[in-house]
């Protein structure tokens, strides 16, 4: 049995990086020529110079609210999609709302390699329980499985009793869906005497796969792997397995994507290992999104994967980066915290902590000093007031004491 989906997965990392950035300038030039929204967003930047990560980091991060505003101003796609490419394709509407056009090609969402890494092989029957309406989730799975040579039962969501009857007849070997719905199916099968013992593997997404749930599935004879996917890019990263079929740490990035981790609220990449927002650039000619902030948190794993694939790994989905928080009736945004920190170069990192002082909201900016610097705490508090228009304190935190969890704003108020 082949160990890898294709030769791309085992390229020398330097070759992969060089090939991606060799393609990028011409791709950006073509995309900005055809997409007026993207051209407007990148106005003033010479895309021909974007030949490495340092140059890419000089481009602005496009976040979902920005894209939504473009689409409201110029519906449906805001000038970010090739209208001529829609013929024979689908259009989706994701929460936000954000319109998403389907790209050309077979398995352009790169889900087949995630199935392969999960131990799924051609001929397997996949019971797909993702929703087939409005959003592309089910189609990401569907097209990936069929590209691998699997047979797909388009189960969709709900109708648990009918799904059980179908699975009992079809005897699928693979479950695809959210992490928790398989437990609903298995528990209901046990209650009603249906036989779902054919299901031995699963590929899940769209929610957290908690270790206890994975262990429960393993005890029931089902090996579950997960992938991290979005409507805009499809599968961004996926789990790989060791020789025993157990998951390796982290998730392997998909090929043909450039993934960065940036400090939430900024355009700036963080150091390897530091938690930040996942930012993705794709080579989708129908929907060319450049430095799109997903709003999800993760971090780079520096060590190579023991599975033999050579791409970069991330720690997987670690929560949301959008930490906009209402304080005293006004929203405080991570961008504002970044503005405060930028005014004081002797600050290494900061974290705004929001609490309650009696019956009133209170906020305090905890900062770590850069090197042997001695930040002016009073000046930092004044900057905080100036930027947010709200009163708040500042405090010098011991070096290394701020959690590496990607949080710029920590809301510690009790809502119980």
Image (tube, helix red, strand yellow):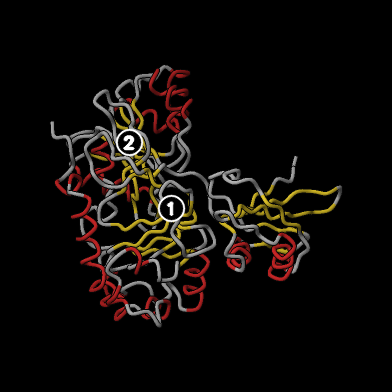
Question: Residue at the location (49% across, 44% down)?
Answer: 318
The alpha-carbon separation of the residues under discs 2 and 1 comes to 40 Å
* Residue picked out by circle 2: 127
Above or below 407: residue 149: above
Judged from this view, the residue extending furthest toward the front is 372
416 or 199: nearer the eye?
416
Query: Residue 354: x, y in percent?
Result: 72, 51
Instruction: Residue 140 in the image: state x and y as whole percent.
Output: 32, 50
**What quarter of the picture does the N terminus occupy?**
top left
The first of marks 2 and 1 along the sequence is: 2
Residue at which label 1 appears = 271
Along the viewing direction, whichever of 385 and 174 lies nearer the viewer: 385
Q: Secondary structure at mark 2?
A: strand
Q: Is residue 77 left or right of residue 197?
A: right
Q: Would residue 379 be found to the left or right of residue 120 on screen?
A: right
Residue at horizontal 14%, vertical 46%? Answer: 7
Dot 1 alpha-carbon crowd within 10 angstroms: few under 14, some 14 to 19, many 20 or more: few
Q: Secondary structure at mark 1?
A: loop
For image coordinates 61% across by 69% down, the residue present is 343
Q: From what the image shows, is residue 283 above or below residue 35?
A: above
Please rate how many residues cluster around mark 2, counting C-alpha atoms within 10 Å: few if below 14, some from 14 to 19, many from 20.
many
Q: Residue furthest right?
A: 358
Which one is in front in this view, the residue at disc 2 or the one at disc 1?
A: 1
């Amino acid at each position: 049995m082949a160990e890898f989906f294709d030769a791309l997965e085992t390229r020398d990392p330097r070759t992969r990086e060089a090939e991606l950035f060799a393609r990028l300038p011409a791709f950006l030039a073509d995309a900005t020529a055809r997409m007026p929204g993207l051209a407007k967003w990148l106005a003033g930047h010479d895309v021909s110079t974007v030949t490495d990560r340092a140059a890419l980091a000089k481009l602005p991060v496009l976040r979902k609210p920005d894209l939504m505003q473009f689409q409201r101003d110029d519906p449906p796609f805001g000038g970010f999609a090739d209208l001529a490419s829609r013929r024979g394709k689908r259009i989706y509407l994701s929460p936000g709302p954000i319109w998403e056009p389907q790209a050309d090609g077979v398995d352009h969402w790169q889900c087949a390699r995630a199935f392969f890494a999960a131990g799924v092989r051609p001929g397997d029957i996949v019971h797909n329980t993702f929703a087939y309406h409005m959003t592309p989730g089910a189609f990401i799975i569907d097209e990936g499985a069929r590209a691998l040579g699997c047979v797909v039962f388009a189960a969709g969501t709900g109708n648990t009793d009918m799904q059980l009857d179908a699975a009992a007849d079809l005897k699928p070997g693979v479950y695809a869906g959210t992490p928790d719905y398989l437990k609903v199916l298995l528990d209901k099968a046990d209650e009603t005497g249906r036989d779902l013992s054919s299901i031995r593997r699963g590929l899940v997404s769209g929610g957290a796969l908690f270790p206890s749930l994975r262990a429960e599935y393993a005890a029931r004879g089902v090996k579950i792997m997960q992938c991290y996917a979005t409507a805009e890019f499809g599968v961004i990263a996926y789990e790989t397995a060791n020789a025993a079929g157990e998951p390796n740490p982290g998730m392997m990035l998909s090929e043909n994507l450039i993934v960065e981790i940036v400090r939430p609220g900024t355009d700036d990449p963080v150091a390897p290992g530091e938690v930040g927002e996942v930012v993705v650039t794709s080579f989708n000619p129908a929907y060319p999104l450049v430095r799109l902030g997903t709003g999800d948190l993760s971090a780079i794993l520096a060590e190579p994967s023991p599975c033999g694939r050579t791409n970069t790994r991330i720690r997987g989905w670690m929560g949301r980066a959008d930490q906009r928080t209402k304080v005293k009736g006004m929203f405080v945004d991570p961008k504002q915290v970044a503005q405060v920190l930028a005014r004081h170069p002797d600050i290494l990192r900061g974290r705004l902590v929001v609490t309650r002082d009696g019956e009133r909201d209170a906020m305090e900016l905890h900062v770590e000093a850069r090197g042997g610097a001695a930040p002016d705490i009073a000046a930092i508090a004044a900057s905080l007031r100036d930027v947010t228009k709200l009163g708040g304190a500042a405090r010098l935190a011991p070096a290394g004491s701020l959690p590496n969890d990607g949080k710029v704003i920590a809301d510690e108020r009790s809502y119980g």
